[in-house]
Amino acid sequence: GNSVTQMEGPVTLSEEAFLTINCTYTATGYPSLFWYVQYPGEGLQLLLKATKADDKGSNKGFEATYRKETTSFHLEKGSVQVSDSAVYFCALNFNKFYFGSGTKLNVKP
Amino acid sequence: DAGVIQSPRHEVTEMGQEVTLRCKPISGHDSLFWYRQTMMRGLELLIYFNNNVPIDDSGMPEDRFSAKMPNASFSTLKIQPSEPRDSAVYFCASSLESSGGSSYNEQFFGPGTRLTVL
């Protein structure tokens, strides 16, 4: 079947630290991959996406590369800010959306 | 574009009462999704519609839950009777599935309805 697994949180970092949130997937075909972000009290917003192998999605300093060989789509940012504190969801779309369980990021000043 | 609109934003009710949540998807989108989010279970897909027709309702927890989409611009999720364990944030999302292949398109989420059943 199709599923997404992402690292457990919470992840706590100091401002300007490097961020990695791991995401791996299982799919019966070739899905599109997404990262969504949820700020407190809000709905999920698309952060970035990649639709085929080796594509790199990027937005607001965040990046993720679609790695078919390792079935991964890890989220990275070189220097996090306090305003990046949120819950991050990895997801795949293969005729249906499958979301990971979410990873909470806390960034301290 | 106003985005996905949900109402009410907050609902507090007593056990046994009927609750109706409302959603207006983005104009032109042909698919609509209802999700429930709790600390314990995370984000769960309850039901989704394509062209106003329910396609997959396997996530609807029990007969107390029902959803309708009478037209392309409106959907409701009803809980009758409500129970304390239904307390959660309920999200509606919409997407355009029919163009370019369904797997490429993102879902757009509303702000959610926070439901508290006492």
Image: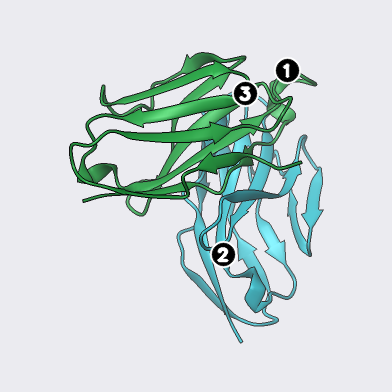
Chain colours: A cyan, B green
Label 2: which secondary element: strand
Chain of the residue under the numbered disc 1 shown in the image: B
Q: Which quadrant holds residue B15?
A: top left
Residues indicated by labels 3 and 2 sit on the same polypeptide chain:
no
| Amino acid residing under circle 2 | Ala
Q: Name the residue nearer the viewer: A6 or B56.
A: B56
Q: Residues within 10 Å of mark 3 (few under 14, many from 20)?
A: many
At x 70%, y 81%, the residue is A16
Q: Secondary structure at mark 3?
A: strand
In terms of sequence position, does the residue under pointer 1 or pointer 3 come before the other? Answer: 3
Q: Which residue is mark 3?
A: B31
> Label 2: few (<14), some or many (≥20) within 10 Å?
some
Q: Which mark is residue B98?
A: 1
Q: What residue appears at the point 56 percent right and 26 percent down from the top-left corner?
A: B74
**Which residue is found at the position 41% from the left and 29% from the top?**
B77
Per the model, the C-alpha gap separating discs 1 and 3 is 9 Å
Depth check, front residue: B3 or A60: B3
Q: Marks 1 and 3: CB-CB under 8 Å?
A: no
Residue beneath label 2, please? A86
Q: Nearer the viewer, mark 3 or mark 2?
A: 3
- Residue type at mark 3 is Ser
